[in-house]
Amino acid sequence: MAGSGYECRKYACWWFLAQRNFSPLARPQLLWYEFGKDGVGKSKECYNFPKFTESYKTVKRMFFQQEFLDFFIELAPNNHKDWFDLNRKRYEQFVKEPFKDFVSHLIAKMAEKDPAFKELEAKDCIFRINRDIRFSKDKQPYKLQVSAIITPEGKKSKAVNGVYFELGPEKIRVYGGVYEIDKEDLLIAREGIAAHPEKFKKAYRDPLFIETFGEIRGEKNKILPKELKEASEMEPLIYNKQWYFFTEFEPEMILSDQLDQLILNCYEAGRPVEQFFNELIKR
């Protein structure tokens, strides 16, 4: 996008789908209009959707209004308690409650395919907007986005089954995979990759996974146990001590009636990798 940070979005007017007759399997281009100070609007291509699956049937619905983005845009230069308290009603009306509704909706859709999500509630998945500033040099008290992790046990779970996402005026980010893992499970995961390298490759080389996330990321160890070194020559990802992935989308998608499908589709795209680790690590 032209401009930088929040400034360019002060002149963003609206966006639209280039394909009016939207198909759940189509890959329409998302365009938006950026209006400069001269009042001249220019359409700009933001991104292409990943392919939508037909496994989730949803009614088109906008969960968020422009006020959602406006709140965070205004919070950025006013990140202190006095401003937040004065605007708390805005936060609750346009951010907190709509996000809770959105997360509840996603849980219900995911539970249609996996009963492990049926007992889950939105409050168990949503992170606070307050930042933990105890050990940080940055003392700004509030995050500039909302976030949630939908796993069978919500925020307390370390299960490799679910999706984490952030919505804010800068971007949308969607994550999956293995981020936190203890030493015992790390060894189990590595031994599983060594024992089933082709099955693992098939999971992360799945065309939809590559199209959506690109690659598996994560910190690596420089040294491996001797018994894993030979296997690591065939599969270098054994060196990883994390196996996570993420993708980003333009923030204008937050105002779309296809936002739920976007998150759900990312969840589906990451499932082959997550299922591989779920079979190895029994939570």
Image: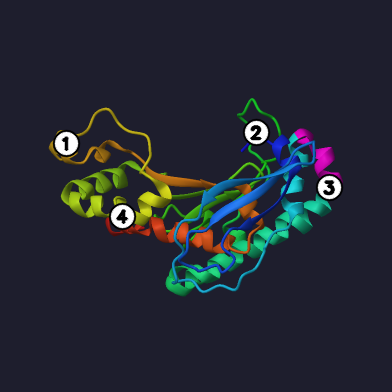
Q: Are marks 2 and 3 in contact (CB under 8 Å)?
A: no
From the image, state whether disc 1 or disc 4 is nearer to you: 4
Q: Secondary structure at mark 3?
A: loop
Badge 1 is on which residue? 233
Identify the amino acid type marked 2: Ile
Q: Secondary structure at mark 2?
A: loop
From the image, state whether disc 2 or disc 4 is nearer to you: 4
From the image, state whether disc 2 or disc 3 is nearer to you: 3
Tell me residue 269's x, y (percent). Answer: 40, 57
Badge 4 is on which residue? 206
39 sits left or right of 200 in the view: right
Identify the amino acid type marked 3: Asn
- Give the Cα distance between marks 1 and 4: 21 Å
96 sits left or right of 193 in the view: right
Task: Examine the structure image and report whether residue 177 is included in the region drawn in magenta.
Answer: no
Q: Earlier in the sequence, mark 2 or mark 1?
A: 2
Give residue 38's quadrant in the image.
top right
Residue at 67% x, 64% y: name it. Answer: 62
Instruction: Name the mark on residue 133.
Output: 2
Q: Earlier in the sequence, mark 3 or mark 1?
A: 3
Q: Earlier in the sequence, mark 2 or mark 3?
A: 3
Identify the amino acid type marked 1: Glu
For this rendering, which residue is in front, 103 or 27?
27
Instruction: Name the mark on residue 87.
Output: 3
Q: Where is the N terminus found, in terms of image quarters?
A: top right
Q: Secondary structure at mark 1?
A: helix
- Give the Cα distance between marks 2 and 4: 40 Å
Q: Earlier in the sequence, mark 1 or mark 4?
A: 4
Residue at 39% x, 51% y: name it. Answer: 211
Residue at 37% x, 53% y: name it. Answer: 209
Q: Are marks 3 and 4 in contact (CB under 8 Å)?
A: no
